[in-house]
Image (cartoon, rainbow, N blue to C red):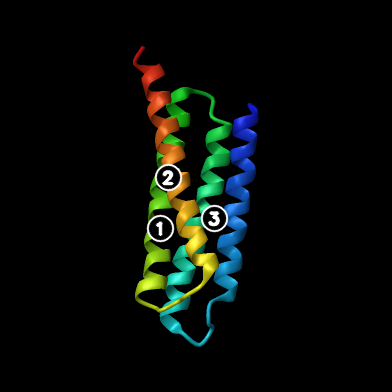
Amino acid sequence: MSRTSDDLRKRTRTYASSIVRLFVALPKQRVEAQVIGRQLLRSGTSVVANFREASRARTTSEFVSKLEVCIQEADETDLWLELLRDDCGIVDDKLESLLAETNELISIFVTMAKRSKATLNE
């Protein structure tokens, strides 16, 4: 595994841990925050699980497929974070930093998928 891939494995693991900590900190009495929080927990932790699968892919096609799942799950996570902020009134610096990290990860995954697809077409 390359150093970049190892760094990204650590980064996505840290990301998932931050998602878990945000979920735990959500107000328990706010039903809507808990419902959205569970969706966030599922999609946010799925990013790291799918990236781990991608890093163990046997073929470039399999790698791209798993990266595309990472993109979808990260995009869904972005939605839940926005809903917590905009519709549930959750104001938290951790949430804002997670939004930024989510969008950075999406950009990284998109770039990786595009580059990998280009090698398939050569």
Q: Amino acid at mark 3?
A: Thr
Mark 1 and 2 residues: CB-CB less than 8 Å, in contact? yes
Residue most extreme to the bottom: 29
Q: Residue 52: percent from the left, percent from the top?
A: 58, 40
Q: Residue 71: percent from the left, percent from the top?
A: 41, 44
Number of callouts in the render?
A: 3
The residue lying toward the viewer, choosing from 17 and 107, is 107
Q: Which residue is mark 2?
A: 106
Q: Secondary structure at mark 2?
A: helix
Mark 2 is surrounded, within 10 Å at the Cα level, by few (under 14), some (14 to 19) or many (20 or more) other residues, namely many
At a point 54% along the width and 29% down the height, the residue shown is 57
Q: Secondary structure at mark 3?
A: helix
Q: Amino acid at mark 1?
A: Asp
Q: Amino acid at mark 2?
A: Ile
- Left or right of 79 on screen, residue 66: right
Structural distance between the alpha carbons of marks 1 and 3: 12 Å
Q: Which residue is mark 3?
A: 45
Q: Is residue 115 above or below residue 30?
A: above
The first of marks 2 and 3 along the sequence is 3
Q: Is residue 27 above or below residue 17?
A: below
Q: Which residue is mark 1?
A: 78
The first of marks 1 and 3 along the sequence is 3
Q: Is residue 72 above or below residue 64?
A: below
At a point 59% along the width and 64% down the height, the residue shown is 20
The residue lying toward the viewer, choosing from 62 and 119, is 119
Q: Is residue 32 above or below residue 120?
A: below
Q: Residue 69: percent from the left, percent from the top?
A: 42, 43
At a point 46% along the width and 46% down the height, the residue shown is 104
The residue lying toward the viewer, choosing from 121 and 84, is 84
Q: Quadrant of the C terminus?
A: top left
Checking the image for residue 17, the label placed there is none
Q: Secondary structure at mark 1?
A: helix
